[in-house]
């Protein structure tokens, strides 16, 4: 029977692919029509897109004059890539940004991977020790690390910094607000509800504008707050309101019997919440947290209205250079690809975690 095993495996793979297509693309007449419409659209668009982006594109050269064909001028992206990634960060110090990114991966992988020994410790280190090390690297001001003002930060680096700081700050605050909204104390519950509804009812653009323009008006004469810190502080408060609702949904998803069983064992309220309820709730809401992180990562482009230059802002500034006029499609396509890769990676992790959670619940039943 051994010779038939490869053929059987291939047959099973084909049947699995057919089931996936039938379940996801042809499960109803409406989806079937949409699938064929999408295929027709792709058949028209893809050849032209390939011709422009790859077949007739120019990559090598040192100026716009090197782009002699009618395709994309990727020379622009290649030469401006350091600006797109690091902004105006001093070239001689950009190694510090690279080290900070490597450390982020080194802390995040064991914190997010199932089966990591002492995973909870890695999560704590990711949210506490890593920000201290990364902040010291990026800001400097100590022997061996010259000070780099935040006005020079930009590009993809700024998107990552803002996203990480905002998520790391808004999650603990969101947990407190979620518990406050469920509190039996009327005063705490009222304040929590008012805070959540206020920030959820205000557009993000308004929040950033208030942080950049109105907040300095209320400071004492001569007192200043860094523009990046003002923006990140406002974003932490804004995102915490949404995170609170995500956490509250997770808390409601934990069976009340779990809390009653913990109390019957003599655990106090704080021990019950930190050891029993909250860990289960956090496991439930990981997909929701990741969805919020994806949405917020895309919203970081709005910081350009307060004078900060993220990836999209760096592209816009580069397009104003007389040497690179008329290359907006290349710049925006590059930015779109970068954002898609980052968001797709986060979404893929969220989906895989959701599948593992569903399998775990199935086994527990």
Image (cartoon, rainbow, N blue to C red):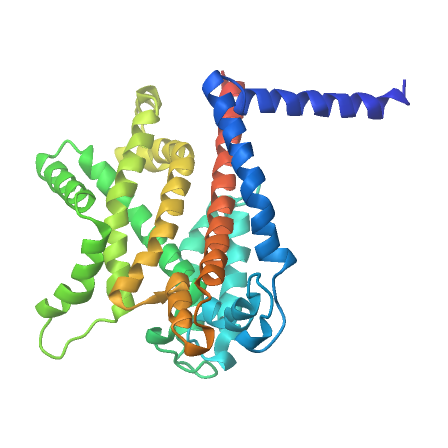
Q: Is residue 240 above or below residue 324?
A: above
- The residue that appears at 33% across and 19% down in the rendered structure is 257
Depth check: give the residue in front, 198 or 264: 198
Q: Is residue 83 above or below residue 285?
A: below
Depth check: give the residue in front, 188 or 109: 109
Q: How far from the left and from the top, in percent, is residue 109?
A: 54, 50
- The residue that appears at 57% across and 56% down in the rendered structure is 52
- The residue that appears at 55% across and 33% down in the rendered structure is 39
Image-based side of 179 in relation to 216, left or right: right
Q: How far from the left and from the top, in percent, is residue 66?
A: 59, 74
- The residue that appears at 43% across and 83% down in the rendered structure is 146
Quarter occupied by residue 106: bottom right
Depth check: give the residue in front, 210 or 68: 68
Q: Is residue 19 above or below residue 125?
A: above
Residue 156 shows in the view: yes
Q: Quadrant of the N terminus?
A: top right
Q: Is residue 136 above or below residue 206?
A: below
Q: How far from the left and from the top, in percent, is residue 358?
A: 49, 25
Image-based side of 205 in relation to 360, left or right: left
Q: How far from the left and from the top, in percent, is residue 282?
A: 38, 36
Count how many numbered circles sit on residues in the image.
0
Image-based side of 98 in relation to 256, left or right: right
Residue 135 shows in the view: no
Quarter occupied by residue 134: bottom left
């Amino acid at each position: 029977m051994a010779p038939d095993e490869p053929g059987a495996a291939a047959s099973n793979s084909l049947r699995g692919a057919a089931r996936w297509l039938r379940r996801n693309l042809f499960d109803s007449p409406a989806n079937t029509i949409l699938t064929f419409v999408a295929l027709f659209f792709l058949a028209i668009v893809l050849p032209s897109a390939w011709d422009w982006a790859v077949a007739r594109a120019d990559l090598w050269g040192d100026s716009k004059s090197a782009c002699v064909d009618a395709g994309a001028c990727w020379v622009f992206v290649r030469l401006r890539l350091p600006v797109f990634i690091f902004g105006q960060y001093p070239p001689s110090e950009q190694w510090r940004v690279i080290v900070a990114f490597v450390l982020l991966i080194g802390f995040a992988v064991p914190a997010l991977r199932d089966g990591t020994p002492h995973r909870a410790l890695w999560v704590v280190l990711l949210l506490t020790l890593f920000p201290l090390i990364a902040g010291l690297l990026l800001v400097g001001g100590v022997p061996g690390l010259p000070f780099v003002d935040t006005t020079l930060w930009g590009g993809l680096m700024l998107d990552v910094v803002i996203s990480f700081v905002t998520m790391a700050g808004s999650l603990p605050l969101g947990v407190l607000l979620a518990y406050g909204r469920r509190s039996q104390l009327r005063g705490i519950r009222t304040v929590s509800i008012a805070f959540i509804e206020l920030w959820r009812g205000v557009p993000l653009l308004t929040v950033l504008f208030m942080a950049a323009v109105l907040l300095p008006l209320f400071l004492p004469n001569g007192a200043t707050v860094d523009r990046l810190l003002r923006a990140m502080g406002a974003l932490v408060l804004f995102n915490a309101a949404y995170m609170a609702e995500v956490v509250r949904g997770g808390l409601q998803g934990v069976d009340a019997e779990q809390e009653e069983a913990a109390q019957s064992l003599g655990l106090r309220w704080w021990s019950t919440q930190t050891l029993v309820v909250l860990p289960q709730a956090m496991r439930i809401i990981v997909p929701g947290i990741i969805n919020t992180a994806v949405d917020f990562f895309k919203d970081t482009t709005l910081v350009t209205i307060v004078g900060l230059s993220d990836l999209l802002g760096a592209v816009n500034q580069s397009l104003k250079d007389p040497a690179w006029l008329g290359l907006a499609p290349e710049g925006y396509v590059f930015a779109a690809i970068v954002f898609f890769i980052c968001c797709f990676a986060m979404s893929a992790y969220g989906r895989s975690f959701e599948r593992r959670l569903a399998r775990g619940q199935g086994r527990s039943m």
